[in-house]
């Protein structure tokens, strides 16, 4: 399982693993892929800097990248306006009422309140770029398409290629025009922010649209070596995977005790590929989440319409904190793709990658026999 991207990035396998966990990202890199750390959870640039210091020390000299959330157009973020003031009272009332109905207790009085993931804001994302470029990163990916042109230029000045997600062929062409080096073709099946076209249709469309002017990674619905082989057969030069890593042994975010699955992991392990929903309730933009009592509540007649980004994230941030603290697998707010149906055990990252490589080899051998 080798493509030109293996030589470009100095990796053994063209497996790019997105994760908010530095422990998972480092393990992916050590196992021969490229771990890509999601930065949106870091409100404080100094905290991100410290985590990247940890990455530098724990990747055994192997390459890694970062993922930011930055719109190409610089928004007006209301420098003189408290964004909390823009959230309607009826939305806050709905949140309080719903959490009470779901039996989610309030936070302890001495708990620090999460007032929103500021990484959704353009200014904070720019600080993430500045911090990341002080480290030996090998890739900057943007979850919202092309970064601003000056950010792309800044990355290129440091010799760092830029990747951007695309849900349509026209998005891919625009990325290339903007100077993006790698287009991530993300199908409808994917977790988190995703479009409306399925991977089997989208991937060859994007490969044809960029016509060799950028490398293409396949994302959405990939969790086995057979699916990696299918992606490469459709023209991709590698795969971009996110959901699969949520049930790895190294994923420690939200774990209640060492060595035990978190409530989120318990929910994922029990889910089928039918147990996800695409909704705007997580961030204000369409994103695929695990279907739970929390997502069901937003479909009821008394539920308000989700707010635009970043207001929706600010609205639900403390609710997500309460849900995570409560530890009820039936009430989870977590982005995940339809591949969740294959995520049936807590598995070390190295074993996941070994299974991907072995499954890929078996699929290629089977095709050779047919041919």
Image (cartoon, rainbow, N blue to C red):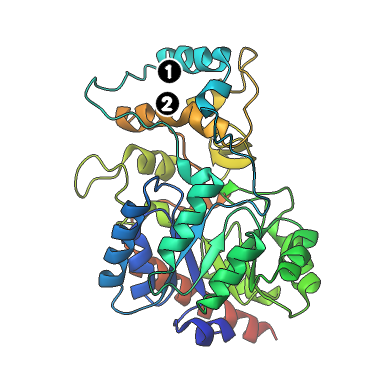
Instruction: Answer whether residue 345 is visible to the viewer in this image.
Output: no
- Of residues 178 and 106, which is closer to you in this image? 178
- Of residues 19 and 327, which is closer to you in this image? 19
299 w.r.t. 240: above or below: above
Rendered image: mark on residue 99? 1
Instruction: Answer whether residue 338 is visible to the viewer in this image.
Output: yes
The residue shown at (54%, 40%) is: 289
Percent coordinates x, y for residue 119 in the rendering = 47, 46
Q: Is residue 89 left or right of residue 26?
A: right
242 w.r.t. 277: above or below: below
Q: CA distance from mark 2 to mark 1?
A: 8 Å
Q: Is residue 187 left or right of residue 94?
A: right
- Give the foreground label among 2 and 1: 2
The residue shown at (45%, 72%) is: 34
Residue picked out by circle 2: 319
Q: Given contact means CB atoms under 8 Å apart, are the residues at marks 2 and 1 in contact?
A: yes
Disc 2 packing (10 Å; few <14; some 14–19; many ≥20): many
Residue furthest to the left: 258
Disc 1 packing (10 Å; few <14; some 14–19; many ≥20): some
323 w.r.t. 264: above or below: above
Tell me which label, 2 or 1, sits earlier in the chain: 1
Count the marks: how many? Answer: 2
Percent coordinates x, y for residue 254 in the rendering = 31, 42
Q: Place residue 26 in its image quadrant.
A: bottom left
Q: Is residue 197 left or right of residue 247?
A: right
Q: Assign a secondary structure to mark 1.
A: helix
Q: Assign a secondary structure to mark 2.
A: helix
Percent coordinates x, y for residue 218 in the rendering = 62, 66
179 w.r.t. 345: above or below: below
């Amino acid at each position: 399982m080798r493509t030109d991207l293996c030589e470009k990035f100095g990796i053994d396998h063209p497996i790019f693993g997105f994760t908010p966990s530095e422990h998972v990202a480092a393990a992916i890199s050590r196992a021969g892929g490229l771990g890509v750390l999601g930065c949106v959870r870091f409100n404080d640039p100094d905290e991100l800097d410290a985590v990247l210091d940890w990455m530098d020390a724990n990747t055994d000299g192997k390459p890694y990248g970062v993922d930011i959330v930055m719109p190409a157009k610089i928004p007006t973020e209301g420098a003189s306006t408290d964004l909390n003031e823009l959230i309607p009272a009826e939305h806050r009332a709905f949140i309080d009422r719903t959490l009470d109905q779901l039996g989610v207790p309030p936070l302890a009085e001495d708990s620090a309140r999460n007032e929103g993931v500021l990484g959704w804001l353009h200014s904070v994302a720019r600080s993430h770029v500045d911090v990341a470029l002080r480290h030996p990163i090998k890739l900057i990916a943007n979850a919202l398409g092309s970064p601003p042109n000056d950010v792309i230029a800044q990355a290129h000045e440091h010799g760092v290629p830029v990747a951007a997600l695309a849900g349509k062929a026209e998005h891919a062409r625009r990325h290339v025009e903007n100077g993006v080096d790698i287009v991530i073709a993300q199908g409808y099946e994917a977790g988190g922010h995703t479009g409306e076209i399925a991977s089997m249709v989208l991937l060859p469309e994007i490969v044809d649209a960029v016509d060799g002017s950028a490398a293409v990674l396949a994302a959405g619905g990939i969790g086995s070596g057979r699916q990696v082989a299918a992606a490469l057969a459709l023209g991709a030069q590698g795969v971009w995977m996110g959901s699969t890593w949520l049930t790895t042994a190294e994923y420690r975010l939200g774990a209640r005790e060492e060595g035990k699955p978190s409530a989120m992991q318990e929910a994922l392990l029990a889910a089928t590929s039918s147990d996800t929903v695409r909704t705007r309730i997580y961030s204000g933009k369409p994103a695929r989440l695990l279907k739970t009592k929390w997502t069901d509540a937003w479909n009821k007649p008394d539920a308000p319409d989700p707010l635009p980004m970043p207001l929706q994230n600010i609205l639900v941030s403390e609710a997500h904190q309460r849900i995570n603290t409560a530890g009820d697998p039936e009430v989870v707010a977590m982005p995940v793709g339809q591949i969740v149906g294959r995520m049936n055990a807590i598995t070390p990252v190295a074993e996941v990658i070994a299974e991907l490589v072995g499954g890929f080899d078996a699929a290629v051998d089977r095709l050779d026999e047919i041919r």
